[in-house]
Amino acid sequence: MDAAHNNRQFLKRALFVCAGMFLFGFACVPMYRLACVHVLGIKVDGRPVDGAKIAGFTADPNRYVTVQFVGSVNSALAWQFAPEKRSVRVHPGELNEAWFDATNVAPKTIVGNAVPSIAPKTASLYFNKTECFCFTEQTLQAGESRRMPVKFIVDPQLPADVDTLTLSYTFYNNQEATKKLAAQERATTPAS
C-alpha cells in the first residue's frame, strides 16, 4: 500500500468521526428528553398543561411547598442565564410566576432551547406549567437581554412528604436554527 492510499483512508475515517460527533451534538437534547421520560420516569412537558386539568385544582391554604430555581447553560452556548429568585414558597393549587434572565454575550445572534427538569423526579408529575419560555426557541441578538416568565401550579395532590421541589433549566445552543438564522441574515444583508 502506498502512502497516498493510507492518507485517503485516514481522511475518510476522520471525516466519518467528525460527522458522527456533529450529529451527536444535534441529538443531545432529544436524547435527554427521551432519557428523562422513558428511563428516569420524569415528565418533560413541551407544551402548557391542559386548562381543564388545572381548573379542577383547589388551593390548599394550609400547606406550603418551596420551589427552588436553578438556571444553567451548556458550555457550547455563550449566554448568561439565571433565575431572578432562588426560591419561592407557594400554596399547592395556586397559580404562581417566576422570572429568569438571559443575556447573549456572543457577538452574534444565537437561538437557544431550554430543557427543564424537576427534582425529586416523583414531583415532576405534580408540577404543571401554564406558560414557559421552554416551550419555544429563544432568539437573542448579540448583547440582548431578556426576562422570561414561567407560570406554574403545583398539584394539590403532591405527596405530603414532598415539601421542596427544584425546577432546573439548562439552555442549549440550537445550532441548526442558529445557522439557518445566520444564513437568512446574510441573504438579506446588502453587499458592501
Image (cartoon, grey):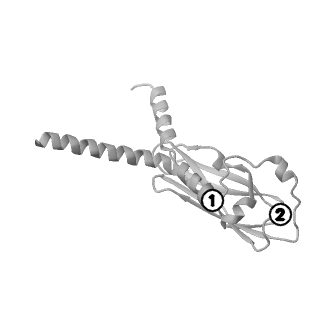
Counting residues from the N terminus, which is met first, the one under dot 2 or under dot 1? 1
Q: Quadrant of the N terminus?
A: top left
> Are there few (<14), some (14-19), or many (20+) residues within 10 Å of tag 1?
many
- Whether tag 2 and tag 1 are in contact, CB under 8 A, the answer is no
Q: Quadrant of residue 160?
A: bottom right
Q: Residue furthest front?
A: 1
The residue closer to the viewer here, 124 or 188, is: 124
Residue 104 place in picture, x, y as percent: 52, 49
Q: Which residue is mark 1?
A: 117
Q: Which residue is mark 2?
A: 156
Q: In the rendered picture of this protein, how many numbered marks are placed on residues?
A: 2
Query: Is residue 104 something that shows in the picture?
Result: no
Q: Quadrant of residue 16?
A: top left
Q: Secondary structure at mark 2?
A: loop
Residue in the image at 27% along x and 41% along y: 12
Residue in the image at 83% along x and 59% along y: 94
Residue 7 place in picture, x, y as percent: 18, 43
Q: Identity of the amino acid at label 2?
A: Pro
